[in-house]
Image (tube, grey):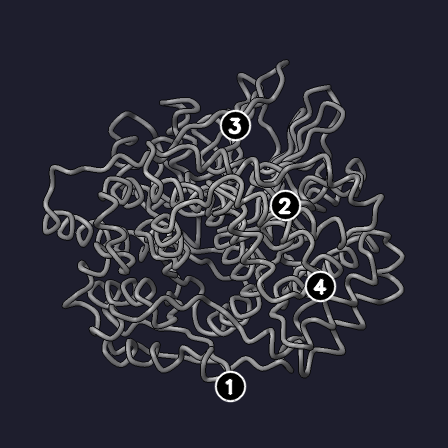
Amino acid sequence: MCGIAGVVSRGGRTVLAEEIRAMCDVMTHRGPDGEGLYVAEGVGLGMRRLSIIDLETGSQPIRNEDGSVWVVFNGEIYNFKALRRDLEARGHSFYTATDTETIVHLYEEYGARCVEHLRGMFAFALWDARRRQALLARDRLGIKPLYYAEVDGRLLFASELKAILQSPEIQRRLDWNALARVFTFLTTPSAESIIAGVKKLEPGHLLLVPAGGEPRTQRYWEVAFEPDHGRSEADLVDRLRELLDESVRLHLVSDVPLGAFLSGGIDSSAVVATMTRAAATPVKTFSIGFPEADYDERPHARRVATAFGTDHHELVLEPAGLDVIADLAWYLDEPFGDSSAIPTYMVSKLASEHVTVVLSGDGGDELFAGYDRYLVEARERRYGTPPALVRRALGLAGRLMPDGTRGKNFVRHWALRGPARYLDASTLFGRDAQARLFRPEAFEMLGRSDPWREEAECLARANGCWLSALQYLDLKSYLPLDILTKVDRMSMAHSIEARVPLLDHKLVEFAATVPAELRLSGGTTKRLFKQAMRGILPDEIVGRPKHGFAIPLARWFRGELAGFARDLLLSRESRARGVFDPAYVERLLTLHQRGRPLDLQLWTLISFEQWCRTFLDRKPSGLGSRRPPRPARVLASSGA
């Protein structure tokens, strides 16, 4: 696991080791164990290393036999041993025992199609010195991040946005399209960042930078929901168990201590149960809880830990522990409206005191239809859509009802139809609310974007099955932009690697073949997955209702954190930005105090203000570095 960064100069400008080192220095938390650089004519590659596999000889950048191909890599290739055997049989020579080296030799054999052979989580940048071209790639599901920007004939890339911001060539200007999405769906878009001109490489995509040509992106993988009605439920259960066992076994490959996040939900419990069958010693598990009993999942986690004899560790989070909010802005890189980043940060901190690698259960809800919103959609489809005349009347009534009026959201919701109605349920601030939240000049900038369009386009795919369409949307949007972003940034903040065995792409492709009626059956979510876990997990865990990774933020914003939220959001600095209408922000704070659940809206505003203070008001420094960097190894071109 590493943080990678680099520059490819297509206009003849020299790339300096100092600029690559500056990019790497702000990502020391992603790789506290060392640094490596490769600088040659027109290119510079850099990395910070967290040693996981091949502790002695696995330092990057990694080269091929004659030094004509170089790579920096973030992630893990779980099938690297099988790939290595095949490549050695084809005549390739290896000088390390690391999984990274398989990439350069695969590239020699298959070119850009080398990614098709990789099973794992990854973001890498490869330089072909003979062809003078670069290849950047990101894993199929978006587990590992990769940002890039094009400026004056140079392409800059890095694992984190803050690394690219070290370049004086990048102007720190808001991307208003990205900001609109933050206040609609909590996160920035799949292909853009909060900084204008800095992009994200999307999951399952390559970025090709040919000599003398323009950079271009290319999709190399897509998930297709094509139900297999020819197999019995029993056969599908058996196959699911086989794939889960195989994936977890592959994810256990490590030369450092390893554990698991355990919430007591079916997904994390299934991962822990599978780990215990493969591990020679008790699995270390980590849970976080709250003093508020209705938010505290520790009793369920303890039940699983006891059942499988894990070495279990817990942490209780209280409002007094929220002095980390400023740190979150630094590690998250962008405004982030999901408040579960807080407990994820804290459980990662707990785990980092015992292990370097953790497995998590993320992805199960997207693959096997575990979200309650799928049940809500099924129920609303049974009710049908009101006639057009009724919907117009409801829409008018919703617009006329004052903010805070009970029933306003319900009326507005039923005035919509199709994708718009589904997306409305997960919308933070609708268009009308944004017009009141943002000052007129800021709202005019937002008016050029439509955050719903990209989501609606996803819903239009997936072979006409509404459940497949919703799951496809979550796999393309909510999973990589929210869940995986949160887990990657919060775990790497504490220099630990988080692995997600449920998102092995072979398991994902299998899940897409499960018929809809075996994913969602009546009022039962994740039917097939639950069937596969019966007899393995305690019955009360299999039958538990869905419980998100929620925190009692609404209560905290009415109690201990009420003053903090008000002071921050109505501060002189916040008002001076000219983005939000202070009177509307004041109204949100007041409505929340009166009992309206607006904690997510307030948290998103807080996240944005903290981000502005961290990245716009001052130049980022080494705040995120938890340990001093070690001396860099600078690798120069040998003329290849």
- Answer whether residue 36 is visible to the viewer in this image: no
**Which element type, helix, strand or loop, lies under badge 4?**
helix
Using the numbered discs, state the Cα–Cα distance from disc 4 to disc 1 in whole angstroms: 23 Å
Looking at the image, tell me whether mark 4 or mark 2 is earlier in sequence order. Answer: 2
User: Which quadrant would residue 585 be assigned to in this image?
Assistant: bottom right
What residue appears at the point 30 percent right and 77 percent down from the top-left corner?
305
**Which element type, helix, strand or loop, lies under badge 3?**
strand
Q: Are marks 4 and 2 in contact (CB under 8 Å)?
A: no
Looking at the image, tell me whether mark 3 or mark 2 is earlier in sequence order. Answer: 3
Q: Nearer the viewer, residue 437 or 244?
A: 437
Q: Are marks 4 and 1 in contact (CB under 8 Å)?
A: no
Using the numbered discs, state the Cα–Cα distance from disc 1 to disc 3 in whole angstroms: 49 Å
Q: Are marks 3 and 2 in contact (CB under 8 Å)?
A: no
Question: Which numbered tag is attached to residue 135?
Answer: 3
Q: Residue 6 appears at what percent x and percent y?
A: 63, 37
Question: Which numbered tag is attached to residue 606?
Answer: 4
Looking at the image, tell me whether mark 1 or mark 3 is earlier in sequence order. Answer: 3
What residue type is disc 4 on? Answer: Ile
The residue labelled by disc 1 is: 291
Residue 370, compared with residue 635, is above or below; it is below
What residue type is disc 2 on? Answer: Arg
